[in-house]
Amino acid sequence: MNRKATALDVAKLAGVSRSAVSLVLNGRGDGNVALESQQRIREAAATLNYSPNKIALSLRNRQSRIIGIVSDQVVTSPFDGNIIAGADAVAREHGFVTVVMDTELDGSRDEGAVETLLDRQVDGLMYVTVGLRPLHVPANMDRVPAILANCFDDRPEAVVPAVIPDEVRGGREAAEHVMSLGHRDIAFLAGDSLTPAAPRRIEGYRSAFLHAGLPVNEARVLQVGWDIDAGFHGTMKLLDGVEPARRPTAILCANDRLAIGVVLACYRLGLSVPQDISVMGYDDEFRIAKAMVPALSTMALPLREMGAAAMTSLLRDVDRQQAPDDGGTAAPGGTEPRSGTSAETMVPCRLVVRDSTGQVPAGR
């Protein structure tokens, strides 16, 4: 029977030290091993069909190579699962696995879920929410490196870093898109202010007008809710019985479901989208925005990107807690304690132009 390849065999084939092999194959090569050497190590490992012994690695590094993820309802909801998918992809790339627990919006289960994951000796924790919101961070999350995704620490002395979408910029870019098509009389239909997303998107809308040197017509900003019926009734209030010269030429929406309601109301009133009214959604909701007739122009939430950015940051923090092994060099920061300060990383939303927005009608 052929002998199983070892890390030393890989090192000899790649022409590097054994510690370099350990760093690269354990996901700690960046910043410690030259990129060219990293490539040679991976090629040599593939040639020899070598992979590290995960159990031995865990014992040696005092790591479980497991990241715990708590979600409010990401697992049980049809929305935002891409946040976890993005996080999991980065974890796997670095030799970690993820374990996910969903509390189904029951805040009383948060600490228990975290405790269950800590009992499994996870190396780090992530909390993920459906929809941007402040989070009352479970107290026991501070026992290991932790990060928040699509939510932020609600405490005045917030210490847990967060990765969130740049909602203000998204609202501004949505308005700037229809402005670039000649629209100036632009309405905004938003959800309630209970979630931070709505006021931030409205702030972006206002910012676009200010940057363009145009006045903001506050009567065009309506907080109506988040669902299709809210979009329908809000649009009827804006358009029904209003003479064409006094209608808005574009309606921006705080999510795609509102935009569906807007389009339905336009059809009820005999108006064409986008010939008479341009309609802009937000979220790029799966199986909705692209499938609509007309397909919705929208701002895509960076779900997968947020998950990936959060996991990348978390693994960096996990790595900083570890002492060097195999004679290698510790990642920057070594075993220093966490700084105790929080930071919000803003991930930009992406403009997706489809068929529901068009040039301003002639004469407007």
Image (cartoon, rainbow, N blue to C red):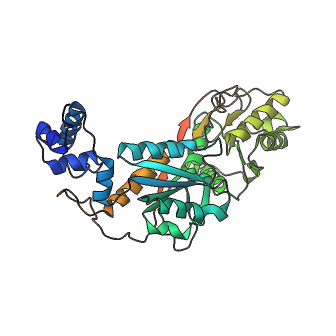
Above or below, 48 against 195 in this view is above
The C terminus: image quadrant:
top right
Kindly tell me whether residue 237 is visible in this rendering: yes
Q: What residue occupies the far right of the structure in this picture? A: 241
Q: Quadrant of residue 356?
A: top right
The N terminus: image quadrant:
top left
On the image, the x and y values in percent for residue 361 come to: 70, 29
Above or below, 146 against 197 in this view is below
The residue lying at 73 percent from left, 32 percent from top is 277
Kindly tell me whether residue 269 is visible in this rendering: no
Q: Is 165 situated left or right of 193 in this image?
A: left
Q: Nearer the viewer, residue 361 or 316?
A: 316
The residue lying at 58 percent from left, 40 percent from top is 299
Q: Is 231 situated left or right of 252 in this image?
A: right
The residue lying at 48 percent from left, 62 percent from top is 118
On the image, the x and y values in percent for residue 293 come to: 70, 25
Q: Nearer the viewer, residue 185 or 170?
A: 170
Above or below, 244 against 160 in this view is above
The residue lying at 76 percent from left, 49 percent from top is 225
Q: Is 289 situated left or right of 21 in this image?
A: right
On the image, the x and y values in percent for residue 36 come to: 18, 39
